[in-house]
Amino acid sequence: MTQPPNNLDHDDSFEQEESLDQNNSHADMPLLSHLLELRDRLLRSVLSILIVFVAMVYWANDIYLFIADPLIQRLPENASMVAIDIVAPFLTPFKTTAYVAVFVAMPYILHQIWAFVSPGLYRHEKKFAYPLLFSSILLFYAGLAFAYFVVFPLAWDFLTAVGPEGIDLSPDISSYLSIVLKLFFAFGLAFEIPVATVLLVWSGLTTVDSLREKRPYVVVGAFVIGMLLTPPDVISQTLLAIPMLILFEFGIFFAKFSTQNKDAKKTEQA
């Protein structure tokens, strides 16, 4: 007597096939080979940063002035930025260019990370990872652009207007660079929330319903993170927290959409 087909058996065979593909991709790669590959990809990433840095270093002063322009435009009349350290006028633009080189080379760096990790992924995970990789790059740059074009003008308007009378405002160029880099990294990483949310749900560490139940904690956490990662002004804190909450909702939506597609494909294959 024949038994009806069992969907669980089909799912198990599907997972076994995926696991077999995954194991075969690593069958001939001992630990030493993995370490050598990791070394090569790290060297390529560092080399890409150096190439971009060398290509831009001639315009180091112009790059710094571009980064500092939102503040320079809002300084009081006859005020200017200053350099407290004697080597700051030389080193600060070079540091700025080095960090900008990292930002510019980020797509290639992420590609190297992806190339190293991808052999360990299942076939369906690879198809899903491509749009995630592309989205993470776009979101990172979107965070940088949001910080420069939206947050900086509003924050510097507020900070340059609230000082006591009789105090000359002359920001130090090194201190400004430190604050700007902190904001750039904060907003660049904050805009990765949708990708992180989708990955958490896709990996099974949490569920869409569980994330929805944690919304009140997420709201509090977003404002705490905004307080810790931004200058001590309400505007920049709020401008970081609100996008984080909006992006969290987008992450929940896309996580739900991706899991529905995953379940639908399993149902079709069953």
Image: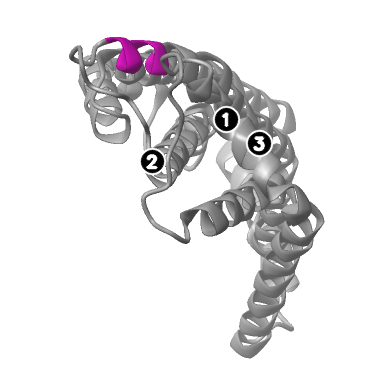
- Please tell me the numbered disc located at residue 144: 1
In primary-sequence order, the first of circles 2 and 1 is 1
Query: Can you tell which of label 1 and label 3 is closer to the viewer?
Result: 1
Q: Report the residue marked by disc 3.
A: 132
* The quarter of the displayed image where residue 261 is located: top right
Determine contact: label 2, label 1, CB under 8 Å.
Answer: no
* Label 2 secondary element: loop
Q: Which quadrant would the C terminus be assigned to in this image?
A: top right
- Residue drawn at (74%, 83%) of the image: 28
Name the chief secondary structure element in magenta. Answer: helix
The spot of residue 216 in percent (x, y) is: 21, 14
Q: Report the residue marked by disc 2.
A: 172
The spot of residue 244 in percent (x, y) is: 41, 21
In primary-sequence order, the first of circles 2 and 3 is 3
The scheme the figure's colours follow is one colour
Front residue (pair 82, 32): 82
- Tell me where the magenta segment starts and ends, as one range: 155-161
Q: Confirm whether the magenta stretch covers residue 158.
A: yes
**What amino acid type should be assigned to the residue bearing mark 3?**
Leu
* Label 1 secondary element: helix
